[in-house]
Image: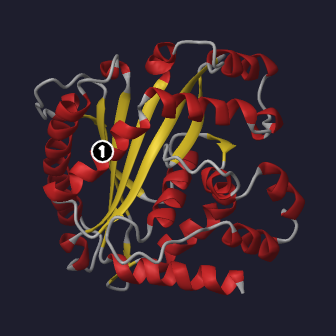
Amino acid sequence: MEFDVIIDTSLFELGINCEGATKNEFLVTLVNDFEDGNWRFEKFQNFVWDNISETALSVTEREALESQPASLLTAAAKNLRLTDSDNDFGKGSELAEIVLYGIMKHKYGALPVVPKIFYKQNVQDNAKGADSVHIVLEGKDGFSLWFGEAKFYSSIEDVRLDAVIGSVANSLAKDKLKKENSIITNVSDLDNLDIDDGIRENIKSALAPKNSIDTIKPLLNVPILLLHECNITATTKEYTKEYRKAIADRHMERAEAYFKKQIVKLRHIHKCDEIRFDLILFPVPKKSPIVDKFVSNVGQYKG
């Protein structure tokens, strides 16, 4: 993983007590470092562009262009919808989806099964589902499902958290879960993966539409990435233990606030206590320069 992991454990292990919590609520804190007195902006942007093709292109398209790096990035950029919305809930959403894809790949070892931006760009059904869909191999022949949410906010105060939890609740509705399962089993990327044929068939069998959605709840994980502006990061010049502690303290406080709200909001979902939730918090000094640079680069590639 290119970014440092400060926290990666359950709320239970952190000693955070939320009424109704299980041992399936996790906090992950990722941070970028500093150089020459500045947050490493270019390193973050490079991470986005290093992962953009697998998020926005099918495996067939990627393989066809793998010897043409510039063409690969151009094709990926053309599949980005981007939003011209000025509100904090929309701007930068695709950038956040790409970052989550990179985190899933490099931290969790996820397989490149469903390039979600490609899928959303190339189908008529635009019903909202998860922002990311991944499969992680577990042990010799097991696997887990990861249906993620990704947001980029200027703040993670309480007023922002309700919208995130609403999106998570929506993605866990029965029809949305069945839709994501059908995406995994119907796209050709799963057949093109270099995995054991037996595991491939296990995945397809488990996600078959004839099966009850209840059977996949124990396999389901929900990574929730919140890229967010952070005053601590904005006023820091050097990557020190004091900085890491300040971020850790802030994120533990925010994780407690988040999960207290989510537990109440999601308690009606059947077998919700069998689903794992990873709240992934990633602080940046300021949102607008990151989004503006990303949009500008995409525009250049689109021509």
- Whether residue 80 is situated above or below residue 15 in the rendered picture: below
- Whether residue 294 is situated above or below residue 182 in the rendered picture: below
Q: Name the residue nearer the viewer: 147 or 279.
A: 147
Q: Secondary structure at mark 1?
A: helix
Q: Name the residue nearer the viewer: 37 or 187.
A: 187
- Percent x, y for residue 11? 21, 34
Which amino acid type is shown beneath numbered disc 1?
Answer: Gly
- Whether residue 248 is situated above or below residue 240 in the rendered picture: above
**Displayed quadrant of residue 180:** top right
Check disc 1: other Cα within 10 Å, few if <14, some if 14-19, many if 20+: few
Asked if residue 171 lies left or right of residue 161, the reply is right
Task: Please identify the residue farthest to the front as the structure is shown.
Answer: 124
Which quarter of the rendered picture does the C terminus lie within?
bottom right
Residue topped by disc 1: 166
Identify which residue is drawn at 61% across, 56% down: 117
Can residue 7 be seen by looking at this rendering?
A: no
Q: Name the residue nearer the viewer: 302 or 31.
A: 302
Can residue 270 be seen by looking at this rendering?
A: yes
Identify which residue is drawn at 70% across, 67% down: 76
Identify which residue is drawn at 36% across, 46% down: 167
